[in-house]
Amino acid sequence: MIIIGERINGMFKDIARAIKDRDPVPVQEWARKQEHNGAHYLDINVGPSSPDAVGAMTWLVEVAQEASKLPLCLDSTKYDAIEAGLKICKQPAMINSVPAEMAKMERVFAMAAEYGAEVIGLAMNEEGIPKDADSRIALAAELVAVADGFGISPDMLYIDPLVLPCNVAQDHGTEVLRTLREIKLISDPAPKTVVGLSNVSQGTKNRELINRTFAVMAMANGLDAGIVDANDDELMEAIASARIIMNMDIYCDSYVDVFMQRNR
């Protein structure tokens, strides 16, 4: 599974303070820690309270790239901020994210085509997040079709079926798993899949256990990537073990270390 480290996010108090004070130390510490623990991408999110999203995103991208060689996943609902980040990314980035709303898809897919970026597409539209798998899959197909119109191959697109907290939307869980499986039938090549893993446990007790359990279940149903806590060692160990059981990696007694060191 592709690991997108979630920790450089203005919703965390230390990162919000770092953005406000333009203090690179916490950002660069988290960039290094996530890379060291096996992340493949760093999610970069200025958070909802930044008064200057463009300036904050530009600064975050600059300081993160000073500390880490990993590609970035630029995360914002403010597309001007994402474009500012894309302009200075040293490697092709990932855009996080766009719903199946035409005006937003046109804006984001045009950017993706210009900068050679991958895109996370959300299985939702103006009406919100659907409850059932069929509606999520229909929205995924719409995202694939519109992306294709901008010359973006389906395998540059990551569909997020949008898992909700299991304590308030327990009946969505099986629908999300079915969506992960059936998205692979939409096109050839198929789009990839991604989830924001911690959403499944929001507001629950035993969050780490729920996250680990869902990660393994989702992988078995075709999940390609996750926005996760890359420094949760037990989560990373569970993902590494699932990859062995699913014959995705070659077994050796030190397979966990191999998985976590692969991108160091």
Image: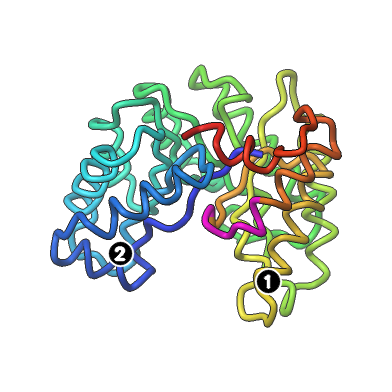
Amino acid identity at mark 1: Pro
The mark that comes first in sequence, 2 or 1, is 2
Residue at the spot 51% in from the left edge and 37% down from the top edge: 40
In the image, 30 versus 19, the foreground residue is 30
Q: Quadrant of residue 174?
A: bottom right
Amino acid identity at mark 2: Ile
The magenta stretch is 230-236
Whether residue 103 appears in this view of the structure is: no
Q: Quadrant of the N terminus?
A: top right
Q: Is residue 255 magenta?
A: no
Asked whether the beta carbons under mark 2 and mark 1 sit within 8 Å of each other, the answer is no
Which mark is drawn over residue 15? 2
- Secondary structure at badge 2 equals helix
Q: Does 68 sit left or right of 263 as displayed? A: left
In the image, 107 versus 1, the foreground residue is 1
Q: Quadrant of residue 48?
A: bottom left
In the image, 50 versus 18, the foreground residue is 18
Q: Position of residue 242 (x, y in %)?
A: 79, 44
Whether residue 95 appears in this view of the structure is: yes
Q: Position of residue 3 (x, y in %)?
A: 57, 43
Q: Does 176 sit left or right of 18 as displayed? A: right
Residue at the spot 63% in from the left edge and 30% down from the top edge: 144
**What is the crowding at mark 1: few (fewer than 14 residues within 10 Å), some, or many (at least 20)?**
some
Q: Position of residue 108 (x, y in %)?
A: 42, 36
Give the labeled residue for mark 1. Answer: 165
Q: Quadrant of residue 104?
A: top left
Residue at the spot 70% in from the left edge and 35% down from the top edge: 141
Q: Does 261 sit left or right of 243 as displayed? A: left
